[in-house]
Structure formats: structure tokens, C-alpha cells
Amino acid sequence: MNITLLDTATLAGTSLEPFQKLGNFTSYSLTSPAQVLAHSAGADVLITNKVVLNRETLAKLPELKLICVAATGTNNVDLVAAKEFGIAVTNVAGYSTPSVVQHTFALITNLLGNTHRYIADCQQGLWQQSEMFCRLDYRFNDIGGKTLAIIGYGSLGKAVADVARAFGANVIISERKNQVTREGRTEFYQAIKTADVISVHCPLTDESRDLIGAAELAMMKPNAILINTARGGIVNEADLANALSNNQIAGAGFDVLSKEPAAKDNPLAAYRGDNLILTPHIAWASEESIIRLVKQVSLNISAFSQGESLNRLV
């Protein structure tokens, strides 16, 4: 079995021995669109994190039997075309839940405590100039007692809710926008109007694209903070940058953008205000998460080779 990994660099130097044990293994650090066909030729199994495998490419890979997406999201693979060509597709879910939850709260606690501002002040020598033992230039707020709204109540949303409750937050679960409110949920607009912290954990779909824009941001409390460790495109980036620059909401913590790597003219990447914390899509990528990811992809391949179905999407 010929196995090819198209973007090894996304696995951050993690041992690839689990793949090497399964067959003839080839890997490429990165694969550009122009290199996809050449790098994929002859493979029975392709492993990709973010390399795009579209219909045109799949049509030219007659030997390909299995695509393993080394991620949860599969928008980089044409699933309809894969099914037509008889190519199985698997993904991996849940491997990064602990690290995404941890990073979500890193963003929340930094924004509520203005930790990043205090760090910058210390680096600039302002503590040394203080007339008292501490500095109290910025607000520092507890999570406890705050209302935290979760948009997207899958495994990640539920894990964030558990941690938020441990901090003493009042957790509300947002209903889908413009849908009948189910028991235990809060109507979407009511959720964003009442929340002190809004944390996004839903997938990017046609329904969720631009889920939060200027109108929704205007409904939020002035002290609200907005967190997105899910997918770029769910929040309109230009509208958010404008809301932040006008202090319409207190802050935002984002780990994702609509186009990655960030474009130079992306409104959030270009924003310089200290009420935004932007990180480069790292929430998923703890060492432990990537080890779990590699192990599960190898199990997906092993199951497929034995005629079994594990994490099959197609």
C-alpha cells in the first residue's frame, strides 16, 4: 500500500512512525496547488491536512482508494466527487478538544484580565515607575458570575460549557439563528444580547457564514467579548474590526480567519488595537493533540485496509 502525506509541516515534527508501519510511505513538507498531482501520483492513500483535493485532481488519480483528512473539517476535499470516483474519505474528530478548550479560556482570561496589556507595560518598564506595589491601569474581571453564551453545542461547545461552569459562569446555549428555540436553549438574538462572553464553536456552513455581522455586534453589550476558535468566516471580519475600533464591544479573541494564512489586508490581521487578541490558528495544535491525530489517522488507514469502516465520511 502506497501512502503519501501531502503536508507534513502541519504536524509539527511529530513522529510519523505509525504511518511508516502501514506501507510504502512518502511525505512532503508542503504541497502547492501546482504540485498536488505530481505529489499524489501512484498513491493508494493520501493524507492531507489542508491541501485541496478537488474534482479535477481526483479525476486524474485512478489508483487512489482512500483520502485521510488529518483534521475534523473536510472542506478541502470534494466529497461528492470522491464518492463518484469510489474514493473513501475519513476524518478525525475530537483529537484537539482539550487544546481548543484550553486556548479558548486563554483568550477569555487574557481579555477579561487585560493580561496582554499588563505584560506589554512590564516589558516597557512601567512597573518600575509605579508609585505603589502594583498597577491597576486596566480592568480585571472574573469569569465567575458572567453570562457565557455558546454558539455551537457539539463536543467542543459542551467541553467549554463544563469549564465555564467550573469558573462559576452562567452558561447559556444559543439556538440556531432564526430557528424555533428548543428546550434548554436560548433564542439566538437573546443570547448575544445578554451574554458577557460569546464563544463560537460551530462549523462553517452556508447557514453559519457571516452569522455575526454589524447588526449582531450592535446588539451585544458594550462590555461583551467575542471569542472564535471555530472557523473563519462565521464572523464578518470587517464589521468586527469596525466594532472594535469604535469600542462597540469590549474585545475579541480570534484564532481563525476567513483566509489562512492571513492576507495582509485582512481587517483583523491589520487591526492594531489592544482590544483584539489574534493567534495564528494554533488552538488545535498542542503536541498532545497532534500525537492523537497521527494515531487516529493511522487507525483509519489500518481499518480501511482490513475492509472495516472507521470515521468514514464517504
Image (cartoon, rainbow, N blue to C red):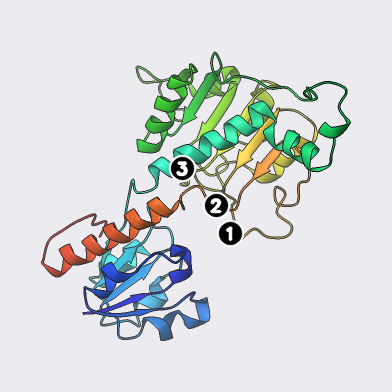
- Frontmost of labels 1 and 2 is 2
Mark 3 residue crowding within 10 angstroms, few (<14) / some (14–19) / many (20+): many
* Residue at screen point 39% across, 56% down: 290
Mark 2 residue crowding within 10 angstroms, few (<14) / some (14–19) / many (20+): some
State if disc 2 and disc 1 touch (CB < 8 Å). Answer: yes
Which percent across, then down, holds residue 20?
27, 75
* Amino acid at the residue labelled 1: Glu
Q: Name the residue under label 1.
A: 260
Residue 7: quarter of image = bottom left
Query: Along the polypeptide, which appears first: circle 1 or circle 2?
Result: 1
* Residue at screen point 66% across, 41% down: 277
Mark 1 residue crowding within 10 angstroms, few (<14) / some (14–19) / many (20+): few
The answer, for residue 201, to whether it is visible in the render is no
Which percent across, then down, holds residue 246?
80, 32
Residues under labels 3 and 1: Cα distance? 18 Å
State if disc 1 and disc 3 touch (CB < 8 Å). Answer: no
Query: Along the polypeptide, which appears first: circle 3 or circle 2?
Result: 3
Residue 265 relative to residue 184: left or right: right
* Amino acid at the residue labelled 2: His
* Amino acid at the residue labelled 3: Val
Relative to 192, residue 295 above or below = below
In this orientation, which residue lies closer to the viewer: 171 or 134?
134
Residue 5: quarter of image = bottom left
Q: Name the residue under label 2.
A: 281
Query: Along the polypeptide, which appears first: circle 3 or circle 1?
Result: 3
Q: Mark 3 points at which residue?
A: 100
Residues under labels 3 and 2: Cα distance? 10 Å
Which percent across, then down, holds residue 81?
33, 68
In this orientation, which residue lies closer to the viewer: 178 or 154?
154
